[in-house]
Amino acid sequence: MATSAIPADPVGSAPPSEHQRRGRESGRVLVLNATYEPINVCTVRRAVVLLLKEKAEIIERGEWDLRSANANLTRPVVIRLVTYVKIPRDTHRRKITRRAVFARDDWTCQYCGSRANLTVDHVVPRSKGGTSTWENIVASCAPCNRRKGDSMLRHSGMRLARPPRTPSPHVFIQVASPSIPPAWRTYLSLPALEAGTQAA
């Protein structure tokens, strides 16, 4: 069943409205490692600092400039770090949040396919020794969560759409910026992202 063991997110259980998406899109920059691997999303301000310190270069530019009292700067959309940054292998294993689970599972209940009223469910209930790991947590609508209760999956008469697994790092890009700007798509594996960005 849903449990407080999974950190809550400040956003709700569904992707933001189109208005919110556009607001976030205008203030986010995709950060690539020196190898062109996407590793993070940052604010425009942080990206400009990295560019001015020559720690990054612009890969994709926005359609408008950033203006200050003294200068005009190209608005970065995608930047690339000049020096390679080593990312710990287990970084993404530690980031289990409701929103990350929903993004991994395409904002879809893994039992019935509903996209409404999402919660998280422990496949093996914690009361029966289940752990709060990527391999034991799935997105579940509230009715399915109540129906399954504290039962083991084989006793509930329910089936999973697919086995839960540790998500790819790209899921965390989606969590940081639910709306994926067109300029980012070249650098991301889109199949896992598009369902989340199109969900209403």
Image: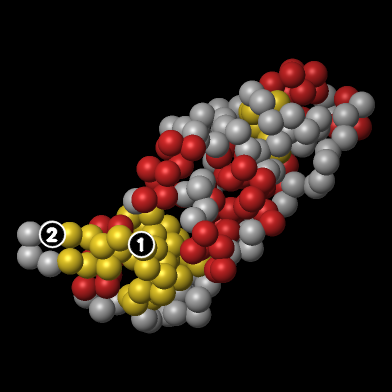
Residue found 17% across the figure and 66% down from its top: 72
Tell me the colour scheme of the image. Answer: secondary structure
* Image coordinates for residue 172, horizontal then vertical, percent: 53, 53
Is disc 2 placed on a helix, strand or loop? loop
- Mark 2, Cα crowd under 10 Å, few <14 / some 14-19 / many 20+, is few
Which kind of residue does numbered mark 1 sit on?
Answer: Glu
Write down the quadrant of residue 60 in the picture: bottom left
Q: Nearer the viewer, residue 160 or 7?
A: 160
Is disc 1 placed on a helix, strand or loop? strand
Residue found 58% across the figure and 45% down from its top: 197
- Mark 1, Cα crowd under 10 Å, few <14 / some 14-19 / many 20+, is few
Q: For the residues carrying marks 2 and 1, which lies nearer the camera in this image?
A: 1
N-terminal label among 2 and 1: 1
Residue found 51% across the figure and 46% down from its top: 178
Separation of disc 2 and disc 1 at Cα? Answer: 17 Å
Residue where numbered disc 2 is placed: 68
* Image coordinates for residue 113, horizontal then vertical, percent: 78, 33
* Image coordinates for residue 151, horizontal then vertical, percent: 82, 24
175 relative position to 84: left or right = right
Q: Which residue ends up furthest to the front in the rendered image? A: 63
Q: Which residue ends up furthest to the left in the rendered image? A: 70
Which kind of residue does numbered mark 2 sit on?
Answer: Ser
Q: Nearer the viewer, residue 124 or 197?
A: 197
Q: Nearer the viewer, residue 68 or 87?
A: 68
Residue where numbered disc 1 is placed: 63
- Can residue 122 be seen here? The reply is no
106 relative position to 151: left or right = left
Which disc is residue 161 wearing? none
199 relative position to 8: left or right = right
124 relative position to 57: left or right = right
